Amino acid sequence: DMYRYLAAATFALGDSNGGMFAWSLAQDSRTAPLLAGIAPVIAAPHCDHDRPQAKGTQVPVLSQTGKWDETVSPSELPWPGNPGDKCVTNRDGDMYRYLASHWITTTWAQGVEGCAVDRLTFPTKKYKFKGLSKESTLKCRTWCKGWKAHSVDCAFDGGHDSPEFTMQAALIFFDRHLPKKKRFDCRKIKKKQHCKKTSCAWKKKKCVSGS
């Protein structure tokens, strides 16, 4: 069978091994051109995969990690570690080594228009989401400008799990990177009282599914 798709509206989302696969898809020259963005959760590439998106492509990334994750540890303890830490050995006894979340998101931002990178520090720009669940402890930082920031490094209070708000944040991030005419206008919800399963769904409590 053959399927139609729009590369400008195709995203990859996954957690743990699925998130590592999302990183790989964006680093691979065969698949990166097919993607408009990725959102790996509690995932990072292995230490020997310190590469940005495939050459000639620009694939925005929203990385979300648990500060105290012992399976795919995002930093040395205490979080956030040091900005110069490239690789982190996980703390669950397997001795796997992953790229620190700060390191790989910095690699991702290097050389991209609108991103000013300094390897010796942590970024000071905050990246915010509106409409996340009250349980959210997500805090995000970026080297890049604007709400369509190219590379965003987020952490939440937790371990190797993917709370509901991580999925919500991913949908909002994807929505922000859609072409303007494909982006769902949340303001219409107030009039029509329905929504699609996008970021807008999380912003309107009294919202029933519809097209």
Image (cartoon, helix red, strand yellow):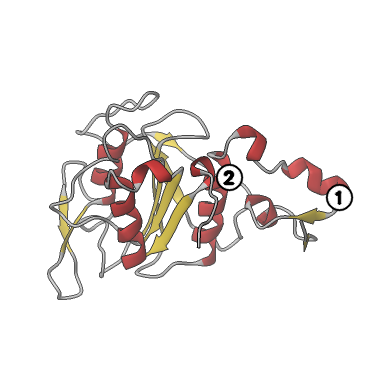
Residue at x-position 27% and y-position 46%:
27
Q: Amino acid at mark 1?
A: Lys
> Which mark identifies residue 192?
1
Residue at x-position 68% and y-position 50%:
200
Q: Amino acid at mark 2?
A: Asp
Residue at x-position 45% and y-position 37%:
126
90 w.r.t. 116: above or below: below
Disc with the residue nearer the chain's start (2 vs 1): 2
Decide: few, some or many residues near mark 1? Use Cα within 10 Å; few <14, some 14-19, many ≥20.
few
Residue behind mark 2: 175
Residue at x-position 56% and y-position 40%:
178
Decide: few, some or many residues near mark 2? Use Cα within 10 Å; few <14, some 14-19, many ≥20.
many
Residue 122, image x, y percentages: 29, 38
User: Secondary structure under badge 2?
Assistant: helix
10 w.r.t. 143: above or below: below
Residue 89, image x, y percentages: 15, 62
